[in-house]
Amino acid sequence: MASNQECLLENGNLINDTREEEEEEVNHHHGKTARQMSASSLRRKSDPALAAGVQNRHLRQLLVNLQVVLFGTKLSVLLPTIPLSIIAVCYGFGKPWIFALSLLAITLLAERISFLTEQISYYTGPTVGGLLNATFGNATELIIAISALSQNNIALLKYSLLGSVLSNLLLVLGTSLFCGGLANLRGEQKFERRQANVNSLLLLLGTFCHMLPMLLRYAGDSAVAADQTLQISRAFSIVMLLSYTAFLFFQLWTHHGYFESQQVSEVDGDEDVQEDAAEVGFWSGFAWLFVVTTITALLSEYVVGTIEDASRSWGLSVSFLSLILVPILGNAAEHAGSIIFALKNKLDISLAVSLGSATQVAMFVVPCCAVVGWIMGVNMDLNFNLIETVSFALAVITAAFALQDGTSHYVKGLVLILCYIVIGICFFVYETPLDRWFKHRFHESSSMDLLVDDICASLRTFVDSQVCYVHRFTNVAAHGMTKLAMSFPNDFCWFEEPSNQIVEALVDVV
C-alpha cells in the first residue's frame, strides 16, 4: 500500500513535472507573437556549416550573424536595392529610380526589423517581447511618418498612415478571408471573436477621435477652428495613447488567452514554422536592430523626398502613391504571411496581423506623431479631411460588421477587397488637397524657373553687347594709335616740347 502511494506520488510528481514542462514550452512559444509568426513564413534556415571552417571565434560569430540577418529570408533578393538606393542618391540618378529602389529596400528592412525583434524577445520573455513588438511592430510606418514630420510634410504623413490602416483593414484582412474561404470552399472558418471585438472597439474609438476634429474644422470660422482643432487633437492623442496602453495591459497580462487561442495547436502541428532557439545573440540583436532601423530611416528620407518627382514621372497622384503603393510594399512580408496562415486555417493569426497592425497604426503611431509634432513645434492634428475620414470610418465599420459572428467565408473577404478597390479608384481620380498643394508648388517652381531664365537671358544679352562695345572701342583705339605713331616725323624729339609735337600729330591724324 505504501509502495503504491509512493508510486502514485512519484507518478503524480512526474505528471506535474510534465505539465510544468509543457506549460513552459507553451509560454516559450507565446513569446513569439502572431505578427512575428506571420513574417516568419518567408524566412529560411541558415547553414552554420558555411562558417564552421573559420578558426577565430569572433569572426565566425560575425559571419554567422551576417548570414542570418542578411540572407535569412526569401526577400534577400532585394538586398542589392539598399546600396543601389544610396549610389543613386550620391550620383544624382533620376528621383523616380531613387523612390522605387528605396521603397523596395524598405520592404526587406521591415521584415528584418520584425525578425530582430523576435530574436530579442527570446531573451526577454513574452511580456517584454510583446512590448517590443508593440514598439517595433509598425516601425516602418513610424519611421516614414517621423521623416515626413521632420520635413513638415503633414499631408503626406497623414495619407501614408491612413493608407496603412486601410490596407490592413480591407486589403490584407480581405485577402486573408478570401484565400482562407477558397481553401474551405464549402465550409466556414472560425476564429476568436473576442479578439476581433476588442480591436474593433479600439478602432471605433479612433474613428471618434478623427471625426470630431474634422467636424469642428468645418463648423466655424477657419482661423479659430484651426487653432481649436489643433488643441483638441493633441488632447485626443493623449487619450488614444492611454487607450492603447490599456489595450497592451489587456493583451499581455489580464486576457492574453484571447490572443493566443491557436498558439498551442500551431506549436504542436505546424511543421513550417521553425523556431527552437535564438539565432542571434541578445546584444548582437540590439546592434543589428539599431543598424537596420538607421538604414530604414535614411531610406525613408529618400522616399519622402522623391515621391513628388515619382508622381510626376509616373503620372500618378502623390496621394495615390502614399495611400496605396507605399503601405502595400512597406509591410509586404507580414501581409504575405497573413495570407499563408489563412490558407492553413489559422485565421486567428491572420486577424492578429491585419487587425493588430491597423489598431497599432491608428491608436499608437498616429497619436504618437501628433505628440512628437507638438514637441517639435509642428502643427500635426487629427483632421484628415472629409473624404479621408469617411473612408477610414467606413472601413472600420465594414470590417467590424464582417467579423461580428466569429465565422468567415470567401464572400466576406471578397467584399472587403472590393471596398479597398473602390477607395483606391476614388483617390486615383479625386484631386486631394495634397495633390493640389504639390501641383501649386510645381507651378510656382516652373514660373520661378522661367523668370530666372529670362533674367539670365537678359544679363547674357547685356554682357554680350558690352563685350562687343569694348571690342569695337579697342579696335578703334588701336587703329588710332597706330596712325598716330606713323604720323610722327623722323626727327621727333620726345624731350623737347613733346606736347606741341603730339598736338600737331593728332591734328594731322584727325
Image: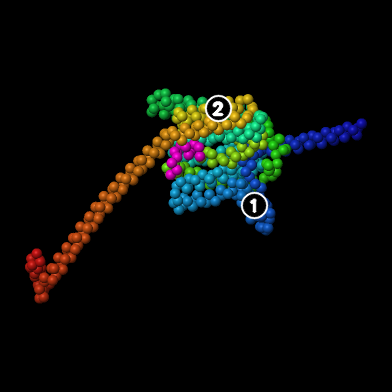
Q: Residue at x 62, y 35 (%)?
A: 179
Residue 172 rendering spot, x and y as whole percentages: 57, 35
Q: Residues within 10 Å of mark 2 (few under 14, many from 20)?
A: some
Kindly report the distance in space between the C-alpha atoms of the residues bearing marks 2 and 1: 47 Å
The answer to which quarter of the image holds residue 20 is top right
Q: Residues within 10 Å of mark 1 (few under 14, many from 20)?
A: many
- Which quadrant would the C terminus be assigned to in this image? bottom left
Q: Residue at x 47, y 37 (%)?
A: 320
Residue 418 rendering spot, x and y as whole percentages: 54, 32
- Which quadrant would the N terminus be assigned to in this image? top right
Q: Residue furthest bottom?
A: 491
Frontmost residue, 110 versus 18:
110
Q: Is residue 321 magenta?
A: yes
Q: Residue furthest right?
A: 1
Q: Give the mark nearest the N terminus, 2 or 1.
A: 1
Name the kind of residue labelled 1 in the image. Answer: Val
Magenta stretch: give its range: 313-325
Which residue lies under the disc numbered 2? 398
Which residue lies under the disc numbered 1? 64
Dot 2 falls on a residue whose secondary structure is: helix
Residue 365 visible in the current orientation? no
443 vs 322, left or right, is: left
Frontmost residue, 115 versus 235:
115
